[in-house]
Image (cartoon, helix red, strand yellow):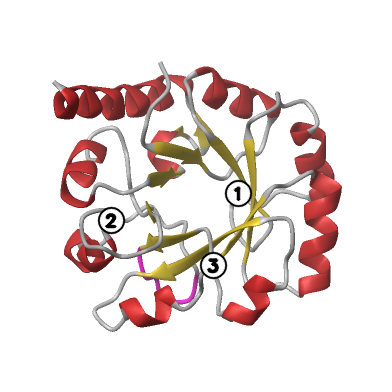
């Protein structure tokens, strides 16, 4: 059964990881092209992408990359969505035609709704703030910081929640914020590798929450 909450598993590095996620009903796969322990080469991402079935979202994650390089990688790997985690401007994000855009921001008391609203992108992603790096640290932030961007706040862009999500805490996250989607990486890993049982548990928790809401 597919989930109404959209789910992206990020940091895919092998075809078996991708296949396991899709078999458990995940909507989108993320390939990290920025500095990270989960960084993947364009060649490897392209080889995985071409083996995926249709209607699967292929998301490239970039941090302050040159626009020309992003365009080259996106075309080569068959990406349909670009996720920007750096200081990319709204004009920069608008320069990519034919792609869905996700703009990520570090959750902070100083992050304004007005700043995020100005991007007019496909969705806003909120992640934990880290010193010296952009996301991927597996820590939860204070979800109260995301309330102005939540599904019930009237914020006009879809909210994707990231940062330390796992099978144990995702129901609370959904109940607190009712996001359009969730983005998970380390929370479904064992020894740095995506684990099908953890992905299944994550998806089952989401479906259970959805069934309770619809009962």
Q: Quadrant of residue 51?
A: top right
Q: Residues within 10 Å of mark 3 (few under 14, many from 20)?
A: many
Name the disc covering residue 38, or none.
1
Image point (80%, 50%), residue name: 42
Q: Residues within 10 Å of mark 1 (few under 14, many from 20)?
A: some
Counting labels gives 3
Query: Disc 2 vs disc 1: Cβ atoms closer than 8 Å?
Result: no
Image point (25%, 47%), residue name: 178
Residue matched to label 2:
140
Start and end of the magenta stretch?
128-133
Picture coordinates of residue 185 (x, y %)?
46, 43
Q: CA separation, marks 1 and 3?
A: 15 Å
Q: Earlier in the sequence, mark 2 or mark 3?
A: 3
Q: Secondary structure at mark 3?
A: loop
Q: Nearer the viewer, residue 102 or 205?
A: 102
Q: Quadrant of residue 91?
A: bottom right
Residue matched to label 3:
85
Disc 2 versus disc 1: nearer the observer: 2
Q: Nearer the viewer, residue 126 or 155?
A: 155
């Amino acid at each position: 059964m597919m989930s109404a909450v959209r789910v992206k598993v990020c940091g895919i590095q092998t075809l078996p990881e991708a296949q396991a996620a899709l078999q458990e009903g995940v909507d989108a796969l993320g390939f990290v092209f920025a500095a990270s322990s989960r960084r993947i080469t364009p060649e490897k991402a392209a080889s995985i992408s071409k083996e995926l079935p249709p209607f699967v979202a292929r998301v490239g994650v970039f941090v302050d990359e040159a626009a020309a390089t992003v365009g080259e990688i996106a075309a080569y790997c068959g990406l349909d969505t670009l996720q920007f985690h750096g200081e990319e401007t709204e004009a920069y994000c608008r320069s990519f035609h034919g792609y869905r855009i996700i703009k990520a921001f570090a959750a902070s008391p100083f992050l304004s709704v007005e700043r995020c609203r100005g991007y007019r992108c496909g969705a806003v992603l909120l992640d934990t703030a880290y010193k010296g790096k952009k996301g991927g640290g597996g820590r939860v932030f204070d979800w109260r910081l995301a309330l102005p961007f939540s599904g019930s706040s009237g914020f006009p862009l879809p909210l994707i929640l990231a940062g330390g999500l796992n099978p144990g805490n995702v129901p609370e996250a959904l109940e607190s914020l009712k996001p359009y989607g969730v983005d998970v990486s380390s929370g479904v890993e064992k020894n740095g590798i995506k684990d099908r049982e953890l992905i299944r548990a994550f998806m089952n928790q989401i479906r259970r929450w959805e069934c309770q809401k619809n009962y």
